[in-house]
Amino acid sequence: MAEIADELFGARGKLKAGLSYLTREKFPERSKEFFEFEGEALTLWGYQLLLIPGLLQTEVYARTLIAGNQPPLDDETIDKRVAARLERQQLLTRQPPVQCNFVLYEAALRCPIGGPQAYKEQLVHLLEAGKLRNVSIQVLPFEKGFPDALSGSLVFLETRRHQRFVLAEGQSISHFTGDPEQVAIAMQRHGMVRMEALGVEESTRFIERIVREL
């Protein structure tokens, strides 16, 4: 845009000269608002349909996903987004603790992102994260799936000021809102997912069985 504007307004390179001072965004535009509020989270609940949540990803898993973006990203952008994703994971060990619950559809556990070794390391990383007192991980098995559980991923957060938000995600689309009616509807869906999901201990055994199979 700066290059086009420079030509249109006859700025003789003055607008283009400022390009060297620009820095690339750490997060995609569609996610920035959510991440701003995530930093203030008191509690966070998530349901992921196909991928391991960013807060629980290993570096290799995160890099594989981000580098596989279409259209392709340049190396600098990939590095910054991977670093930003790993930096966000400080939320899990922050003081005072943030209460986190993650429900994962079985499909998210079955996709070997990054290859066999990276896949196994990611599952082991989930088990380690689940040992944190403020983190609970549940699995929704294939046989427990139902229509609303297959319609997309959801993330809820409540801030220290007790504001509640929901992020609903689809392919290349994110809808972030604090509208009480929309939050309530999404929470009903999420409540059904949690009700059908395995308990925390059973979910741990479920993931351990997958690891042993590898």
Image: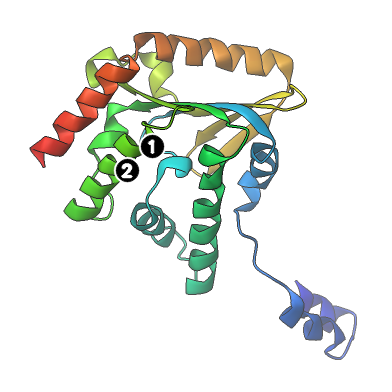
- Secondary structure beneath dot 2 equals helix
Q: Is residue 25 above or below residue 50?
A: below
Task: Give the quarter of the image for residue 127.
Answer: top left
Side (left or right) of 58 relative to 157: left
- Classify mark 2: residues with Cα within 10 Å, few (<14), some (14-19) or many (20+): some
Identify the image's colour scheme: rainbow, by chain, secondary structure or one colour. rainbow
Q: Amino acid at mark 1?
A: Ala
* Residue at 55%, 53% in the rendered image: 87
Q: Quadrant of the C terminus?
A: top left
Q: Nearer the viewer, residue 32 or 86?
A: 86
Q: Which residue is mark 1?
A: 129
Q: Which residue is mark 2?
A: 125
Task: Give the quarter of the image for residue 13.
Answer: bottom right
Q: Is residue 139 above or below residue 65?
A: above
Q: Amino acid at mark 2?
A: His
Q: Position of residue 165 (x, y in %)?
A: 67, 26
* Residue at 45%, 65% in the rendered image: 72
Q: How far separated are the C-alphas under marks 1 and 2? A: 6 Å
Q: Position of residue 10 (x, y in %)?
A: 89, 86
Q: Quadrant of the N terminus?
A: bottom right
* Residue at 25%, 49% in the rendered image: 121
Q: Are marks 1 and 2 in contact (CB under 8 Å)?
A: yes
Q: Nearer the viewer, residue 16 or 157?
A: 157
Side (left or right) of 107 relative to 3: left
Side (left or right) of 170 relative to 203: right
* Residue at 27%, 28% in the rendered image: 106
Side (left or right) of 84 relative to 113: right
Task: Give the quarter of the image for residue 204.
Answer: top left
